[in-house]
Amino acid sequence: MNEWTQERPVRTPGLSAKEEILARVRSALATPRRDEITEAQDVPRDYQRADDKQEQRTAPEKMRDVLVQRLEDYTAIVHRTTAAEAPAIIAAALGEARGVVVPSQLPEDWTSAVDAELLVDDGSASPHRLDALDAVLTGCHTAIAITGTIVLRGDGRSGRRAISLVPDHHVIVVEAEQVVLGVPKGIERMAEDPTAAWTMISGPSATSDIELSRVEGVHGPRRLEVVLIEPEPEPDPAPEAATDPASASTKESTA
């Protein structure tokens, strides 16, 4: 284990500033660095992990609530819906878009109510062609609740990075099982395919210049809308049948 100490050479009468500085350098070179890792047991283990109790025990609905809150803090628009209502909500989110680019393996149900012209991306559309489109519709791989981050993988559901950067309006569909609480769990899911092209999105594109003037849409879409597909609500329990007083009295007399 490292034997780091904060002790420094004590300045003694007659010791010049130069000699004191050189003595401190010699002391530092002879002492292991505070952040030097020499053995496996030197690695700190107090950081948050994917198997953290908070990650394991937090109710899924609470994680989704946190995700929605973070996304709205980033000025993203969030639509909470169910699988049955998702097509209509997606169409409403796209609004009056006339041309929409989608990845090659996007579920067909998601676009069943969309009236816009759909361009299924095959990788050949140039940035100029993508810029002429009104919106992009994609799925995602993971949504991290605490940071409000949506992770896209360069696959048939999220598409290549260009389609999520060039159009000015991005609609992302997030499914309930894709929501995790913290970054470690999100990284664990991403480790399933470490060589993939990953894009992490936390709200619409925005930046500020030296005078703190906020500018949106410089590095990506100016508008971000998230359609969160949640489980169907459980049906209300059936009310107990009212007891007929006449039948009750008949049973009592029979007894």
Image (cartoon, rainbow, N blue to C red):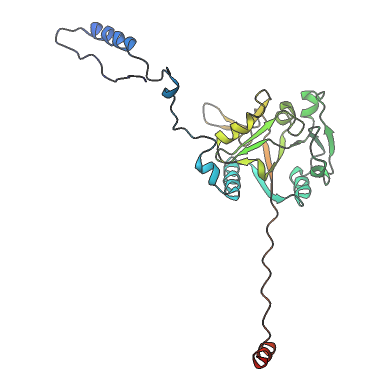
Give the residue at x 70% y 54%: 232
Q: Nearer the viewer, residue 83 or 91?
A: 83
| Position in image of residue 237 (x %, y %) | 67, 66
| Position in image of residue 59 (x %, y %) | 57, 49
The answer, for residue 215, to whether it is visible in the render is no
The answer, for residue 54, to whether it is visible in the render is yes
Q: Residue furthest front?
A: 255
| Position in image of residue 30 (x %, y %) | 32, 10
Q: Residue furthest left?
A: 13
Q: Is residue 42 left or right of residue 96?
A: left
Give the residue at x 46% y 32%: 47
Give the residue at x 51% y 43%: 54
Look at the image and tell me in which quarter the N terminus lies.
Answer: top left
Q: Is residue 200 left or right of residue 56?
A: right
Write down the quadrant of residue 216 in the picture.
top right
Q: Nearer the viewer, residue 201 or 195?
A: 195
Look at the image and tell me in which quarter the C terminus lies.
Answer: bottom right
| Position in image of residue 141 (x %, y %) | 68, 35
Give the residue at x 15% y 7%: 14
Q: Is residue 167 left or right of residue 11?
A: right
